[in-house]
Image: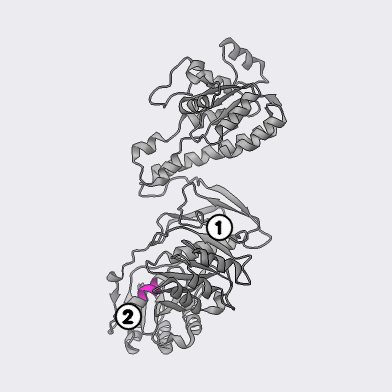
Amino acid sequence: MQPIRRALLSVSDKSGLVDLARTLVGFGVELISTGGTRKVLAEAGLTVRDISEVTGFPEMLDGRVKTLHPIIYAGVLARRDTPEHMRTIAEHKIEPIDLIVCNLYPFESVLGRGDAHEEEIVENIDIGGPTMLRAAAKNFASVAVLTSPDRYPKIIEELNEHKGSLSLATKRMLAGEVFERTARYDAAIAAWFASDATDFPGSLTLPFVRRSGLRYGENPHQKAAFYVEPNYPTDSVCGAEILHGKELSYNNLLDLDGALNLVREFAEPASVVIKHNNPCGAAIGATISEAFSKSWAGDPQSAFGGILAMNRTVDAETANRLAEPGKFVECIIAPDFTPEAFEILTTRPTWKKNVRLLKTGPLSTGARSGIDYRRVDGGLLVQQRDRGADDPATWVTRSLRTATPAELESLWFAWRVCKHVKSNAIVLAKDGMIIGTGAGQMSRVDSVQIAIRKAGDRVAGSVLASDAFFPFRDNVDAAAAAGVRAIVQPGGSQRDGDSIAACDESDLALLFTAVRHFRH
């Protein structure tokens, strides 16, 4: 337990700084500081030495050079248990520094704004901060280092408990946090430099930050945690505000993300019900209440206990329909909830205690851009997100019969839903809603038959979307026999001619997109 006698404070985020500094001064700690940090402390009535007074060198180059000086680094890196080190710094009249308080230039938040120009981004690449943090962390046996204001309250508590000292265990823990922080920081900078590259980088470091632990993973015997990107979108599961309900589970988070990604495909009022990461219901309507009712009616049996996403504020009419007997959902995510809807959903249903209500704020429309990651044993698969080259105007009719305008509208709806269904994926749609889904089957014709069975009597006059080509005409024959009137699929099979002929024999419209949407 070595007492802290001298501290250097240089921070971008000044929250909590004055309280920490006052605690240090209360134990007789000398404060050294730079620029804006020194000004804040001085305005709070604290005595602070300017770093230029310590180094004998002015801050220069618009602040690019201030802490980068041998007097500072010798004071940080000198081992207190090594007499030679202590003699050396004494000979050069260098005083040891026992505490570094430094958080970095806000590179990630500046980049995350989306409107910063290159010069501003570059100037927010911190050089002295990471160097000083790493130096202090290396010498953690002698020097404490703080890089996050979130740590200040606990450190103040320990300083008070130990009369101005910190334990070795605490200093070691803080040092580990430094290397985590600088690794994330450098990874974010490297990713920015690579953002214009035409290929993926030669190495990959992912700057994710732990948001929370989870009770367990997919199953109770699996440990799990939730990590987020530094600049996650606000209209996402990561950015959503939990308004009500118990803790989210690993499976909840997966399904919420799937539901939100699908519902943002639509500009019109839309509602989606996800079960086991597949849409069992999806619909558009004139109002969000109508869209919800249609989405639930798509497969009421499967919808029970599912995850619900809507792209409009949930109103009282929608909440009343959702609170009806026989309906139950685990989570609801939407841009917002009216006060009346919130009261209904948290007081009226029998499942009111546990339902999670999540508010995203306004949702952007269309598929997200960016990169997706998937773990394999010993490695990581990386790919661009599936935004697709989707434009119904580019679809090609391959059948003798042309789809009607109403059929084309339903095909476009079904195609967007199909992109979010596990392959082999088949979606049957009619009147702006899913009426049957076949997901994740090893045989495509099995998916067709499951979707038809789910649709029941509603299949007559419906349309069908397939995420990939038909390998055999049996898919078309099964759909035609059930009453399907139009099909959209990518095409590209060696047996496309057989499927085209089958459509012509049954007077079905067939369109090719030339775009595949596998989702494994």
Mark 1 nearby-residue class (10 Å; few <14, some 14–19, many ≥20):
some
Seen in the picture, residue 216 relative to 104 is either above or below; the reply is below
Give the image location of residue 272, x and y in percent: 48, 70
Taking the magenta stretch, the answer to whether it contains residue 75 is no
Residue beneath label 1, please? 242
Displayed quadrant of residue 152: top right
Give the image location of residue 494, x and y in percent: 36, 75
From mark 2 to mark 1, how far is it between C-alphas? 39 Å
Mark 2 nearby-residue class (10 Å; few <14, some 14–19, many ≥20):
few
Amino acid residing under circle 1: Ile
Q: Is residue 495 visible?
A: no
Give the image location of residue 402, x and y in percent: 28, 82
Seen in the picture, residue 332 relative to 136 is either above or below; the reply is below
Which of the image's four quarters has the N terminus? Answer: top right
**Magenta residue span:** 411-415
Judge by depth and name the residue closer to the eye, 29 or 406: 29
Choose the circle earlier in sequence order: 2 or 1.
1
Q: Which mark is residue 366?
A: none
Q: Residue at x 58, y 60 (%)?
A: 244
Amino acid residing under circle 2: Ala
Q: Secondary structure at mark 1?
A: strand
Residue beneath label 2, please? 406
Q: Would residue 351 appear left or right of 428 to someone viewing this image?
A: right
Q: Residue at x 66, y 57 (%)?
A: 215
Q: Would residue 223 appear left or right of 255 to someone viewing this image?
A: right
Give the image location of residue 54, x and y in percent: 51, 16
Judge by depth and name the residue closer to the eye, 508 or 66: 66
Q: Main secondary structure of the magenta part?
A: helix
Seen in the picture, residue 250 relative to 91 is either above or below; the reply is below
Q: Secondary structure at mark 2?
A: helix
Judge by depth and name the residue closer to the eye, 292 or 136: 292
